[in-house]
Amino acid sequence: MIEQQCDQFLKNVSDLATFYLAAGASGKLIASLELPEGYELEMRMSNDFPLVATTVRQANDVTELYQRGEYERLNAYQAMVALCSLFEVFIAKLGESLGARAGSSIRIVSGRRKGVPIEIRNQTLCMVRAIHEKHSIDSQLNGDTAICWIYNFFLLRNIVVHEGGRLSATKRERLVAKWAEHPLDKRLVVNGNHIDDMVHYLRSHVGSFLYQCRP
């Protein structure tokens, strides 16, 4: 059961990475199209309604979005939100399968936070620790540094979802690495490098967890 759930999570992350890259490539391709005169590339959101009753976009709509930099921002934001959601669902199902019960908070000490102990009240990360403790599993996924980084992913996701990506002083205090230096009141700049970091970090640490669980 553990192996199946881990493998499914890894596949889901791989599929999401494929989708993110394909979406980026599609936007770039459409923005670079030179269509014959009088021809329009029409994209309909639904096919069971007349044109006046559905959402329709043309190639120039994509081009305009792409040239403003909004296409890449939206693609990256959606990928970040989806990655965090995939991990949350994975850990919730894993905890249920293993009969683990998460506490209300955990304390970590990480060099990423200058060695200052912090309390984390995130249900998913509390469940990560509960799973390891209940079944005496020793994997990198339960390390304070890993917990710190994944918590940072969640904080970034929350800023995207609840603040439209705009960073306040209060939120910035809780971030680590270069994110803690991001300009205030400006939208988070998330690009392919950041999504790639998240993909590899989650895959490698879940892979470590799976390795430690195998007999």
Image: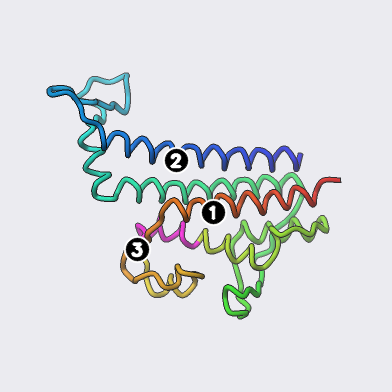
Which is closer to the viewer, label 1 or label 3? 1
Q: How far across and down, in percent of the image, does residue 95 sit?
A: 71, 50
How far apart marks 3 and 2 lie (CA) works out to: 24 Å
Q: Which region of the structure is painted magenta? A: 155-166
What residue do we see at 53% from left, 51% from top? 84
How far apart marks 1 and 3 lie (CA) works out to: 20 Å
How far apart marks 2 and 1 lie (CA) works out to: 14 Å
Residue 158 sits inside the magenta stretch: yes
* Residue type, label 3: Arg
Q: Main secondary structure of the magenta part?
A: helix
Instruction: Give the class, few, some or many, for how many residues have Cα within 10 Å of label 2's Cα (few <14, many ≥20).
Output: some
| Marked residue nearer the N-terminal end (1 or 3) | 3
Find disc 1 in the rendering and name its residue: 198
Residue 21 sits inside the magenta stretch: no
| Marked residue nearer the N-terminal end (3 or 2) | 2
Find disc 3 in the rendering and name its residue: 166
Find disc 2 in the rendering and name its residue: 21
* Residue type, label 2: Leu
What residue do we see at 27% from left, 44% from top? 66
Q: Measured along the vertical axis of the image, is residue 72 above or below residue 22?
A: below
- Circle 3: element type: loop
Taking depth in this image into account, of 4 and 20 the one nearest to the observer is 20
Q: How far across and down, in percent of the image, does residue 211 sit?
A: 77, 49
Outermost residue toward the left in this view: 38
* Residue type, label 1: Met
Point out the image quarter for the N terminus: top right
Which is closer to the viewer, label 2 or label 1? 2
Hey, which quadrant is residue 186 in on the image? bottom left
